[in-house]
Structure formats: structure tokens, C-alpha cells
Image: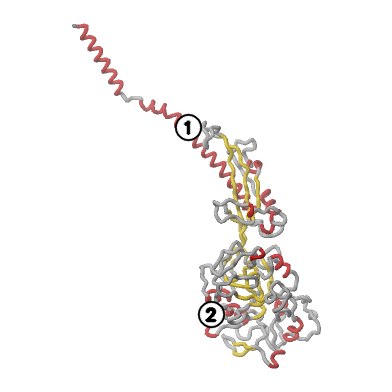
Amino acid sequence: MRGPLRKRAERTVMLRTIRAFWNDQRGIAMILVAIMIPVLIGFAVLAIDVSRLNGLHNDLQKGADAMALAGAGELDGKTDAIVRADRALATLVLGNTYFSSDAAGGPQALLRAGVTRRYLRSIPASDETAIGAADVITDEVAGASSARFVEVTATPVGFSAIFPVSIVGGGSGSFNIGAVAVAGFNRAVCDFTPMFICNPYTNLANLASAIQGHKRSMMVLKQQGPGAQFGPGNYGFLQTPDGGTGTTEITQMVAAVSPKACYSQNGVRTGPGNRPPINDGFNTRFDIYPNGNGSGVDPVTDPPAPNTIKGMVTDVKGKNCGYVAPSGTQLSSYKALPQDTCLPNCTSPQPDRLGDGDWDRKGYWNVNHTPAITSWPPAGTGLDANASRYEVYQWELQNLANHGAEPVTPACNTSSTDPARRLVYVAILNCDTTNGGVSVQGNGGPYPVDAFASFFLTQPADSPPNANVYGEIVDISSQWGTGTLTKFQRDEAQLYR
């Protein structure tokens, strides 16, 4: 019996030992650590790879962004814009990429890896839409002035992962990283009149050619009727910064010395096309204010110009100065700056709206100044044989001693000291759909702006129902301009993609 008992006791001890070993949890952490160490190391390596990947992409993207902005800053609509943009791309930006595995990796790998660029005249409104062939400028010489955007593509550089399995699949653990950026040039103007005109010429280049030198064609701008499409020679108004389109608000902004409004060349929105005439806003410059001040214009805040010759006779003096047209013997003593002699039947693209720059300079002079002259230009004045009306106006400002019946300075109110007070500032739109223009409607847009311009008012605007505005273009904000609009301009480059 002692044998079986002994064997049973030994089995009991063995089972107890196995059970104790089975239930013993001492040292289990070491086992788990041993199992998890490869996993933890793998995640750490993967995190390092992702960090390196992000670092490489960020370096490339920042470099592409910076180069695109540098190039876009030169796309100002001038004929050498692309030449200057290429120079900016080559010299203004240094890029560093520290995580590339290419032979050319390391500092400045972005530049050594290379970039490609293409210039665009437009980009789709949605980032989801690919840039099309119609957006790309293929002739970079002839099309330089129409370049508005530059797309910079950083040539992809190699990246080798430390983690043994490819992050993006494929099993190789190596792939290329690139970057693309699109930046554009934006020109905006501030303290600008909320007004636009439809270019009466077929394009901006023809308008620019017409205002070179001294001779300037007279423009008779006509307001468009209700619901009709705007066409060459029409004018209209822009929405105010707060979206306002009311007649009184627009009138006050047209009359203001510095309208609190900014507009972008990339696009402007129009106000209603059936607005009542706002001649009160224009005519403050001529010392003409409405009775009762229903339009909200006032000679204190909206003073007349220092030169208000307009060929009219003072009828009633006071804050709301009254003027009437001359009659009888007064006709030989009062004369406004004349319209072009060919109007309204000129041979220009818009015969009733666009003159040829020939006007009765001698007749105007002999009515408003002495001594009388027999031929133009007056001796000793420095005026050109083809002097524009604006040049004569400026000469009068410098020589206020006037011997005519109508004084140069306002008869009723204290004038502004600003020699440019007879200027209004307008956006020029191409409304001629047969010559690459857009269909402009009231309460529409945004419509692209060809240029901004200063427009000299030569005589008071017509009262209802005509609402015609008379004057001549002085300067434009383009490669053809003389720079007088730079005080209004805000030029900036920005990223679009």
C-alpha cells in the first residue's frame, strides 16, 4: 500500500506545482514587453517616416508657394510681365528640402530638382476643376499683358521610407513627392467712385492709343435703360462695399471727395440698371447743388472744384446756387469747354458718343480769357496745338486771373483746393460681346475690369431724363498709363490653389 500512496502523493505534488506555476503571474510583463517591442519600434519608425514625409512635402509646397507668389507679383498687365516673372522665379526664392533621398537632396534640393511654370489668363472658379487649355497662355510674348496667374510645379523628389512596408503601397518603400501652387496678381483701388463705363473703343489697347499725347476724344456717356444690356459708351454704377444700391447712397458717393469704397480688378458687381439719374452727384464739382438737398450732397463735405467754368450765368446766390443758360448778349460772354465739333455724327466706333479730339479751342479762349488770339495756341501759355480740355483746365488753375464774364472760381461756395476735383474715377469694362467682352447687366457680376481710369468732367451732367455725362479720359491703370492712379492702387499677389 505504501507504493500506491507514494505515487498518489507525488502526482498531487506535481499537480499542485503545475497549478501554482499556471497561476503564478510574476514576470508576465517581460513577456508582453518582448512581444510588443517589435510593434512599438515599428510604430516609431512609421511615425518618423510620416514626419519626414510631411517635412519634405511642406518644404516643397512652401517653396512652390513662395515662387508662385514671387512670379505673380510681376503680372501687372505690362508687356514684359512674363520676363520679369521668370526673373523673380529664378532669383527671389531659395528653397531647402532636408528629407529627400535624391542625390541632389539636402539644402536647396528644391531648386536643383527644378520647377516648371506656366502662365494663365484665368483659372476655373472651383478648385475641383482642372485648369484647361483655354486658361493657358501659349504665346508668352504676345500674351504677356493678359497673364494674371502663374502655376508653379515642383519637380517630384525621391523619398525612401525607413519602415519596411511602403506607406503608400507597392511594397518598395520609395516614391516621389511633389507640389503645385497657383498664385495670381490682384489690383484693387480704394477711395474710388462707384461707377463703371463700357469702353467705347473695341479694346483697351485702342483706348490707350486714343489718349496718348495731348489730343483726347470727347466722350458722351449714356446711362442704360431699364433691363437692357450695357454696351460700348454706356455708363452705370457699382454696388457699394456694404452692398447698397440706393440712388441717394450712390449719389453721395459720386459727390464725395474720397468715397469709402474699394474695388478689385478681378471683378466688380453692378448696381441696378434702371437707376434714376444722379446728376446731383456729378454737378457738385460745378458748384451746382439741388434745392432742398434731397440727394444728401452738401458744399461743406462735397465742395466744388477750384475751376467751375461751365458756360452758365449765376441766377441766385447762396448755398443752393442757381445757374441758368446764357441768352442774348450773354452768349458771347459765357462758354463751357466745347464738345468735339463732329459730335453727334462722328466717324468713330460710336458716332454719337465718341468724338475725334477736335474742338473749338480758340473760341473758348477768346470768350474766357484775354487778350484775344487769332490762332491757337496762345503765345506764352505752353499749351500744345492739340491741348486737351483737361490741360486747358489745369492751365486755368495756375492762372486764376480771369478776364471773362464767368469767373474761374465758384460763385457761391468755397471751393476745394484739390486740382483733380473735376475728375471721377471709373472702372472700364469691355461690354462689347462681339470683341471678347462680357454681357454686362444691372445687378450682375462679378465682371472683370480691363483697367481703372480717371475721367475729366467737361460740363455739368444732364438732368433727367437724358442723364448724359460729358468728359474725356485722362489716365488708365495699365501698361499704357502715366501713373497718376497709383495713389488709389493696392497691388498684391495671393495664392489661389
Depth check: 440 or 78 in front?
Answer: 440
Foreground disc of the pair 1, 2: 2
Chosen colour scheme:
secondary structure
How many marks on residues?
A: 2
What residue would you read off at disc 2? 295
Residue 398 visible within the image: no
On the image, the x and y values in percent for residue 46 come to 49, 35
The quarter of the picture where residue 173 lies is: top right
The quarter of the picture where residue 214 lies is: bottom right
What residue would you read off at disc 1? 42
Task: Report the residue at 63% width, 86% height from top.
Answer: 411
The quarter of the picture where residue 3 lies is: top left
Circles 1, 2 touching at the beta carbon (< 8 Å): no
On the image, the x and y values in percent for residue 164 come to 52, 31
Q: Residues within 10 Å of mark 2 (few under 14, many from 20)?
A: many
Depth check: 216 or 395 in front?
Answer: 216
Q: Secondary structure at mark 1?
A: helix
Q: Secondary structure at mark 2?
A: loop
On the image, the x and y values in percent for residue 257 come to 59, 74
Q: CA distance from mark 1 to mark 2?
A: 76 Å
Q: Which residue extends farthest front?
A: 434
Residue 332 visible within the image: yes
Q: Is residue 473 above or below residue 94?
A: below
Q: Which residue extends farthest left?
A: 1
Amino acid found under the numbered disc labelled 2: Ser
